[in-house]
Image (tube, rainbow, N blue to C red):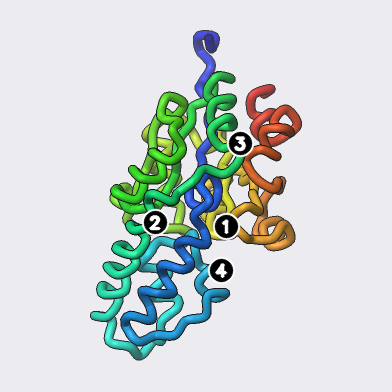
Amino acid sequence: MRAAGLSRKGVLFDVDGTLVDSAYIHTMAWWQAFRQSGFDVPMARIHRCVGMGGARLVDHLLPDGRDTAVDEDVLAAHSGIFGTYWPSLRPLDGARDLLAQCCESGLAVALASSARDQDLKALRSSLAADSFIDAATSANDAKESKPEPDILVAALRAVGIEASDAVYVGDAVWDVYAAARLDIPTIGLTCGGTSEAELREAGAVEVYAGPRDLLDNLRDSAIGRLLAG
């Protein structure tokens, strides 16, 4: 039990590509959605943008001079295609155990996701870790998506902690950029397909291979230092 007078500390987690092995599923779903609207966008370009909100990703990848009415078609197609993969969603190794350890250590645990409500529900179902999660955000909780920090602000408010008492865990450079705007240190995970070099260049304070690797090194990580402090 936390002593009276001490503020609670917490860990915010991205979900897609960080806790659930879905980064490349999103890449495929976006690729198919673009093709349905007549745009041939290379998967490599798409993957580098996964982690942005959907509307921002579409605007970033499609030509400037397009009829922007097509954007809604692409977003709707991605939603439908990704939904077909819900039964295949699987947590990354160690994800549930990592959430459990953070919770049992007395930290507030929040999922800071920009996924749609229905997708977040499917992602949480695959994790089977709701008893270790204090709060979760979705696209409905933020005006602007990553790399803007709105999602993180919403997650902090949901668990009642200050940015100075938090650590963020994510797999994309967009996660790192968003957290940096609030001066929240980010632990990067390469399991979403972004390299250690890219994550460190973006500003990640540490990089691990995935949830299991972070869990195995938790005491010496930024999360461990948060607990010790």
> Which residue is disc 4 drawn over?
48
- How far is mark 2 from mark 3, CA to CA? 21 Å
- Of labels 1 and 3, the one closer to you: 3
Say which residue appears at 51% left-offset and 68% top-offset.
49
For label 2, the crowd category at 10 Å Cα-Cα, with few meaning under 14, some 14 to 19 and many 20 or more, is some
Residue 72 marker? none
Residue 94 placement: quadrant? top right
- Where residue 67 appears, as percent x and y from the top left, is 27, 87
Residue 131: give x, y in percent of width and height: 42, 24
**Which quarter of the rendering shows the C terminus?**
top right
Mark 3, other Cα within 10 Å: few <14 / some 14–19 / many ≥20: some
Picture coordinates of residue 13, whole percent (x, y): 51, 41
Which residue is identified by label 1?
172
| Residue at numbered disc 3 | 94
- Say which of 12 and 161 sits in front: 12
- 3D distance between C-alphas at marks 2 and 4: 20 Å
Left or right of residue 220, residue 3 in this image:
left
Of callouts 2 and 3, the N-terminal one: 2
